[in-house]
Image (tube, rainbow, N blue to C red):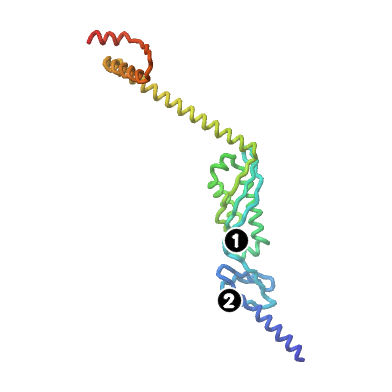
Amino acid sequence: MYPFLGFIAFAVVILLFNCFYVLREYERAVVFTLGRFTAVKGPGLILVIPLIQQIVRVDLRVVVMNIPPQDVISRDNVSVRVNAVVYFLVTNAERAIIRVEDYQGAVSQLAQTTLRSVLGQHELDEMLAKRSELNADIQKTLDQHADEWGIKVSMVELKDIDLNENMVRAIAKQAEAERERRAKVIHADGELQASYKLAEAAKVLAQEPQALQLRYLQTLSNIAEEKNSTIVFPVPVDMLKAFVKS
């Protein structure tokens, strides 16, 4: 008799112990009564009817999920490997538990397919130069699909875009050719501007013979500074006429 009473007392203690749950501030409990959804409770102390009600804990904190490297073919047919990180959180605990079996696994698979789909619509140059825009596009697409599960995708960041060695060399050659093109354009612009200035100077010297004489004497002075033993220079006829007139 006494052992039976002791067993009953032990069972009652266990049931009472399973009646109370303490949920942290970032936790919620999805309560099912005889298999049917009843409520979302928490945080704090909650009461559950043993054997009749069950709970599933849901963490509402932001989850940081690494997306494994994905093989992506860009719009200009370049094969790259891209990985990313996704930041998301549960905003509706009921949907996250009832509408999807494993919401974290679902977000991971959705992120992988979305990553390939969105990046495949862009060329390689856009992937390398417009990461912020691509991050926003991927985040928006993920958030629209995950909202049905009670998930909010707050941010997506592309981490690495890996190219094969042949493509890296091709990009390096392209960059070098672009730098050479810019250098030639700058040099040509400099020559053009210098020609304009020389033309203006020639007009001024043509109008002022004395200025031409001073320029000629300055040139002789510069030649003399080179310490040459012999200097041969032509004398313009116009200059001789200027000296004769003077």
Dividing the image into 4 quarters, which one contains the N terminus?
bottom right
Report the number of numbered marks: 2
Location of residue 98 with respect to 14 vertically, above or below: above
Report the disc number at residue 232: none
Relative to the observer, which residue lies in front, 17 or 141? 17
Q: Residue at x 70, y 77 (%)?
A: 51
| Residue 12 position in % (x across, y down) | 69, 84
Kind of residue at disc 1: Gly
Residue situated in front as seen by the camera: 98 or 112: 112
| Mark earlier in primary sequence (1, 2) | 2
Q: Quadrant of the image for the C terminus?
A: top left
Type of the residue with mark 2: Leu
Q: Position of residue 224 (x, y in %)?
A: 34, 18
Give SS at disc 2.
strand
Give the foreground label among 1 and 2: 2
Q: Are marks 1 and 2 in contact (CB under 8 Å)?
A: no
At horizontal 64% and vertical 53% (from top left) the residue drawn is 110
Which percent across, then down, holds residue 132? 53, 47
Identify the residue position indicated by label 1 in the image. 150
The quarter of the picture where residue 207 lies is top left
Q: Which residue is mark 2?
A: 45
* Coordinates of residue 172 in the picture (x, y in percent): 58, 35
Query: Seen in the image, is 9 located left or right of residue 246?
Result: right
Please name the residue shown 57% across and 63% down the image.
61
